[in-house]
Structure formats: C-alpha cells, structure tokens
Amino acid sequence: MTIRTASRRRAVALAATGASLALVLSACADTDDGAGDGGDGGNAAAPELDCSVFEEFGDLDGTTVSVYTTIVEPEAETQQDSYKPFEDCTGVTVEYEASREMEAQLPVRVQAGNPPDIAILPQPGLLNTLVTQYDAVLPAPEQVEANVDEYWSEDWKEYGTVDGTFYAAPLGSNVKSYVWYSPTMFEEAGYEVPETWDDMMTLTEEIAADNEGATRPWCAGVESGDATGWPGTDWIEDVVLRTAGPEVYDQWYTHEIPFNDPQIVEAWDAAGEILKNPDHVNGGLGDVDSIATTPWTDAGYPILDGNCWMHRAANFYQTQWPEGTNVAPDGDVYAFYLPAETTDERPTLVAGEFIGAFTDRPEVQAFQTYLSSPDWANAKAAATPAGGWVSANSGLDAELLATDFDRLSAEILADPATVARFDASDLMPSEVGTGSFWAGITEWFASDASSQEVTDDIENSWPKN
C-alpha cells in the first residue's frame, strides 16, 4: 500500500503533543522509588503541554463531545488518554462510551433519534449503511478532509467515502496477516518459521504428527458477543488473497462475482484444511466446534500453556496477551507474516477505524480535526506504552511506537511493495459483512456446515438493490 508523504500544512512539531503526553503519563505512573528505571524514580517534572496547535479551534471551554465505539478495555484506557491533550488545551470534555455491541446498537440509536456526536466506525460497510439507509452521517468538515488528503493515501480516503462524498477520516490501522507463535517452543522443537503457504501446511502436519494429539498445531476462537464470527472472516479473507489473488478479492467484496464463486469456495476449503481438521485444532480449547464459542480475546492463550503452536490474529492481538507476557522475537510470543503461495508475493489484509459525525457543533468538528491529525496519532502512540497500536497516518513518528512489533507493522503499512487490501467483511453491505458472513462462519464451525452450503446461504442474503 502506497502511503503518500506530503509537506506539512501547518507548522506542527511532529511529536510535540505525543512526547509531552508520554512524559506526563510517565511522571504520573512511576512511583516506585526508582526500581528498574535507572534510579531517578521517573519523577522529574514533565514539561507543560504545548497547546499552540489547538488555538485554531477558538474558545470551546465547557463544551462536551460524546463518542461511541467498539474500543473496549484494555485499549479503551489508552484511547481515552490520547484525548487528554485536546481536552486539557480546549476545555472540551470527551464522554467515552464503549461496547462490543456497538455495530448492532448504533443503527438503533440513529433510528431512535439518539445518536452520539461521533462514532468510531469499525467498518466502511457500516458507514455506507448509515449514509445510504439512514442519511445520518454528516460530510467531513473541510479541515478534516485537508488532513486526510495530506497524511493518508487515496485508498484510505476512499474507504471513508460514499457515492463520491467524503464522510469519515481514518483513525487507527491494523495489519491482520500475522500468525502468533512461541519462539521458545519453535526453537526447542527445531521448527522454522514458514516462508510459503506450503511450508506452513507442512509444518502443521509435522507438529500434528510429532505431538500425537497431546497438543495441536492451531488454536482459534470467533466468539465476540453480537460481533461473533468476525475473527473467522479474517481467516477467509486472508486465504482468498492468497489462493485467488487481489483482483478476485476486489470482485468478491464488490459483488462483481457472487459470494459463492468457485474461487471463493476453494478458499474456504483451503482454510478448512486447518480450521475444520480435528487433528489441527483447537489446541487446549476443544474440538472444531469449540472455535464458535471460544472468545477471540482468549483464543491464543493455549500457546502460553504449550497446548497450541500457532494462532492467526492481527497486530492488535498484542494487547490481549496476559500482563507480563514478553512479546519479542526471543520472548514468550511473537508473530510472523502469514505466508503467501510464493516468497515473491506479499498480500496483506488491513483494517482500521473511521470517524463519523452525527452533529456539527464547533467542538465536534474540532475533535474530528484533532483525530485526523498527526497530533492525535502521536499522542495515541505515546499513550500506548504496552504497544499493540499503529496507524497509516504518514505524520506518525514511528519512534513513538512502543515496540519493535508495532514498528514492523508501521513499516508494512508504509511499504510500497505491500499489496494491501482492506477487510472485505468491513467493505461489504452490513447485511452481509457484519450479518450473514459473521453468522455463516460461526455456523461453519458449530454445525460442520460445508463451505458450499455456507457460501450459498451468504450469497442468497446479498441485498438485491
């Protein structure tokens, strides 16, 4: 994915807000008499926050902006911390509401006349529904569009655009094509990180044979409340990119070919060689059908117990490991790129959130502008000391990212050689992407439905208009 770098539109010290926030958080959090920090206790006075970048917003003191999102704990705390520069400098109070059921509940609130000021939308498909069916989201302000034109690629802007009108600035960005594993377990067993899909399947068979059912090669889980199923759709999307290719992937999510096209069914079957094979899953968790009921947040944990060897999950799964887990190339867990059919290919599944506004008060537009800027991206990086967050905003200072793994994800997002495609279920009409696709993948595991049966049912659910 090409990420365009442009000259600054206004004189902003790239890391000023983020670095100041990092120092403030460090001074507030470190109270342990200097243990592990070089002896100074981390209590040096932090510099005052630079509020000059917020002067353009004028006097907003005493106003409130409500935000509705799917970003729950543990990420919710760092998300709210990233708002502090805006709140402290403008006097605006950001009221944060998070729910895993947000995708289902937001349209209900819109129809009831009770939308939030801003929603952090996890799918362009949901944005499309809110615009085309409910006429609820307002076009983005001029300042927001200018930020996106400067700091984001045209592809990312297009994801926030409906019928030629730009509505929603991108926010965070995710790299989904990762497999989590234990470097220690691999080294002790003499296993190598696979470089092609065939290598990975050979390794899967080898692990299954070596362990004779005591542990299994893979663990997985797709339970996520009202959003149950989405982690399984990521699997399918990644495999479609690898077996059918990016062009077919584009035809699939735009419905130029049917959902049950033979190339798509073939991809489901290829994923099923891992996910539907009882010799390959679900290590430490149960049989194949347990994938439907295992929370996605916990699905990788059997790696830590030695009951599972690999777990496919996005970069943000870094935040789900239990406290104290060492995420490093020689640590408790790390991740490798989900390989393609050849080493010359680099298809990569990406995703992210978008900022949709339902009101246009000055404080709401100011907050939208902040969230679309490098100032917010750097504040978010500095407010995420445990890692697990990255953005394709070209104004992000990668040195502020907490971990080498985060910087690796940032490099992938910025690498022109990466053939990136956005999460297809997030781009499809919500009736399919967050409806029948999520439900179908869950049924695929729970009832042992065939790939053909499930894709036929999903195709039949596609909106006719």
Image (cartoon, rainbow, N blue to C red):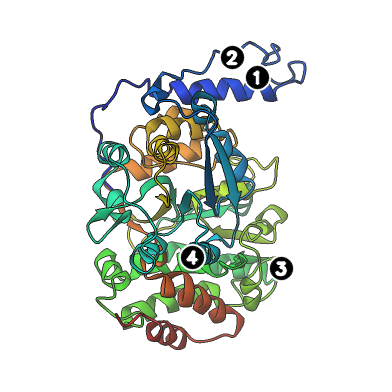
Q: CA distance from mark 2 to mark 4?
A: 43 Å
Q: With respect to residue 252, does 422 lie above or below?
A: above
Q: CA distance from mark 2 to mark 1?
A: 7 Å
Kindly indicate whether the residue at mark 1 contacts the one at mark 2 (C-beta within 8 angstroms).
yes
Which residue is found at the position 56% from the left and 66% from the top? 227
Mark 3 sits on what residue? Answer: 214
Q: Secondary structure at mark 4?
A: helix
Q: Is residue 297 left or right of residue 390?
A: right
10 Å crowding of disc 4: few (<14), some (14-19), many (20+): some
Q: Secondary structure at mark 3?
A: loop
Which residue is found at the position 28% from the left and 42% from the top? 145
Q: CA distance from mark 3 to mark 1?
A: 47 Å
Disc on res. 46: 2
The quarter of the rendered structure image containing the C terminus is bottom left
Mark 1 sits on what residue? Answer: 27
Q: Secondary structure at mark 2?
A: loop
The amino acid at mark 1 is Ala
Q: Secondary structure at mark 1?
A: helix
Q: Is residue 163 left or right of residue 450?
A: left
